Amino acid sequence: MGFCSSFDFSNASLLQSCHLISGNVILQKTEFRQNDIRAPARSTGLTTLPRQVMNEQSKEKLSEKNLHELRGVLGKGTTRKSALQSFVETLRKMDTRYNWVGIYLVRDGNLLLESWVGEQATEHVTIPLGQGVCGYAASSGETVNVPDVNKDPRYLMCFPSTKSEIVVPIHGEKNVLGEIDIDSDKVAAFTMLDERFLEEAAKILAGFLERTS
């Protein structure tokens, strides 16, 4: 028995093979598609993942820079109220999604609006603890991120343009001292990164409020 084969790579369409059996040559032809020679598939995940990680790292660095700026703002205030006012103004400028930024402080079972910045004032300058999104956040001590205020029955409407809201409690050593309240005109404006950043900002405020109380 013998075996012979030939393959023309310049025209990768036909594979010829011949078998010598008992003096007779049997020629066989097999179709061969050029597409059958494939390069290894490229993985897109290997290129996108590092970019995502780099984006997250860039955002984290920006957050650290912003937190440093907020600490500096509080240190420059001549009075407690002026320092808090500079804080909310600086915070609002850090992100275009932050349309209205306010700080409420807890006094006698209520939240009292201490400082704010936005296009217009809110009618809710006093909010009982436990009432609305702000009251719930202060009484529970939990960050509340509302992606769509029209779907949350706790929401107390301030402005028709508001689509989402985030409220972050300011935790003192013994109790909640107040909270940061931010409104946005975009639905689902606030991410987990915003939550972490604002919670760190609230820690800075807590230290300041306890030092100046």
Image (cartoon, helix red, strand yellow):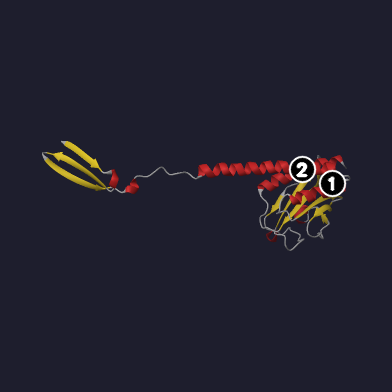
**CA separation in Å, label 1 and label 2:** 13 Å
Q: Earlier in the sequence, mark 1 or mark 2?
A: 2
Quarter placement of the N terminus: top left
Q: Which of the two marks, 1 or 2, is nearer to us in this view?
A: 2
- Judging depth in this view, the residue of 156 and 77 nearest the camera is 77
Query: 10 Å neighbourhood of mark 2: few (<14), some, or many (≥20)?
Result: some
Quadrant of the rendered image containing residue 124: bottom right
- Judging depth in this view, the residue of 69 and 10 nearest the camera is 10
- Give residue 100's position: percent from left, percent from top: 76, 55
Query: 10 Å neighbourhood of mark 1: few (<14), some, or many (≥20)?
Result: many
Q: Residue at x 28, y 47 (%)?
A: 11
- Give residue 212's position: percent from left, percent from top: 87, 42
Quadrant of the rendered image containing residue 206: top right
Numbered circles on residues, count: 2
Residue wearing tag 2: 69
Rendered position, 2 above or below 98: above
Callout 2: SS: helix
Callout 1: SS: helix
Residue kind at label 1, given as amino acid type: Ala
Left or right of 56 in this view: 68: right
Quarter placement of the C terminus: top right
- Give residue 103's position: percent from left, percent from top: 80, 50
Q: Residue at x 17, y 40 (%)?
A: 19
Residue wearing tag 1: 83
Farthest bottom residue? Answer: 160
Which numbered marker is on residue 24? none
Left or right of 75 in this view: 5: left
Residue kind at label 2, given as amino acid type: Glu
Farthest front residue? Answer: 10
- Give residue 162's position: percent from left, percent from top: 72, 60
Q: Residue at x 67, y 46 (%)?
A: 193
